[in-house]
Amino acid sequence: MKLQQVLSQVRRAIDDYHMIQDGDRIAVGVSGGKDSLTLLCALNALKRFYPHPFSLHAVTVDLGFENLDLGKIESFCRQLQVPCTIVHTDIAAVIFEERKESNPCALCAKMRKGALNDLVRDLGCNKVAYAHHRDDVVETMLLSLIYEGRFHVFSPVTYLDRTGLTVIRPLLYMKEADVIGFVNKNGLPVVKSPCPADGHTRRESVKQLLRQLNREAPGVTERMFTAIRNNGMNGWGIAKEEDHGQSGIS
């Protein structure tokens, strides 16, 4: 996938859900994975011509794994001329050594987001961009349905009362396959996750389930995503055109 195609999908999501207004200071959560690197590339390119000026700052939470190569992230940000800040934590040690969590993902996510939000506020940013794509949306809905017994999915835009930050998700129209294609075509420096739980989670099980469903009934993921959008659940209803001016989007 070419950058122009990525930008088309990212801009449509941003415009549909009023994600960016004039003067926004946006922190991009960069883990070094394929999704976050794609998001950083897209927003950096969009910044050059988007009618509502905004600034970017890459932020990375170092969980404390010894074999994580953070130098690749810093080098990539320098190449893009995007400022980068890394916050070092001992989250990995707390979860895997002190607490020895059997299901570490929920606690890790909570601690990681806490560290990230603190850093974002310290940097003076008012928004933080997460790299959730379309497949993440559908997987999250299925995880909630299967393991919690409810229909729930994160919103395209989420205001965090406790921090005063707004979370935006500009990749939500992109398929994971398109993200992979973009990364491979452009040789982005993906940093492999050293987490011992990587690939052995409930989310991975749901990924496998979706692959099986799509083999048996092609287009299942697209139809589920469409259902989420059409139901307007959790802020997924697209705003009317006349509302754009109220949010700074035209």
Image (cartoon, grey):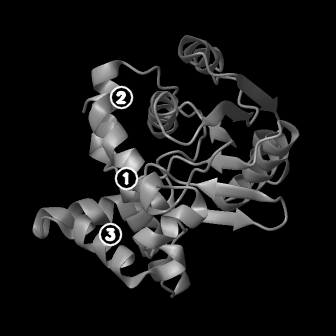
Residue on which disc 3 sits: 225
- Of the residues shown, which amino acid type is indicated by label 2? Val
Viewer-proximal residue among 82 and 90: 82
Residue 204 in sight: no
Residue 77: quadrant of the picture: top right
- Of the residues shown, which amino acid type is indicated by label 3? Phe
Residue 217 in sight: yes
**Distance from label 2 to label 1 (Cα)?**
20 Å
Q: Which mark is residue 183?
A: 2
**Image point (52%, 37%), residue name:** 36
Left or right side of 207 for 195 = right
Viewer-proximal residue among 177 and 173: 173
User: Is disc 1 placed on a helix, strand or loop?
Assistant: helix
| Image position, residue 15 (x, y; %) | 44, 55
Residue 230: quadrant of the picture: bottom left
| Image position, residue 215 (x, y; %) | 14, 62
Residue neighbourhood size for the residue with mark 1, other residues' Cα within 10 Å, grouped as few (<14), some (14–19), many (≥20): some
| Image position, residue 169 (x, y; %) | 52, 53
Residue on which disc 1 sits: 12
User: Where is 225 relative to 64, above or below?
Assistant: below
| Image position, residue 41 (x, y; %) | 47, 29
Q: Nearer the viewer, mark 2 or mark 1?
A: 1
Left or right side of 76 for 55 = right
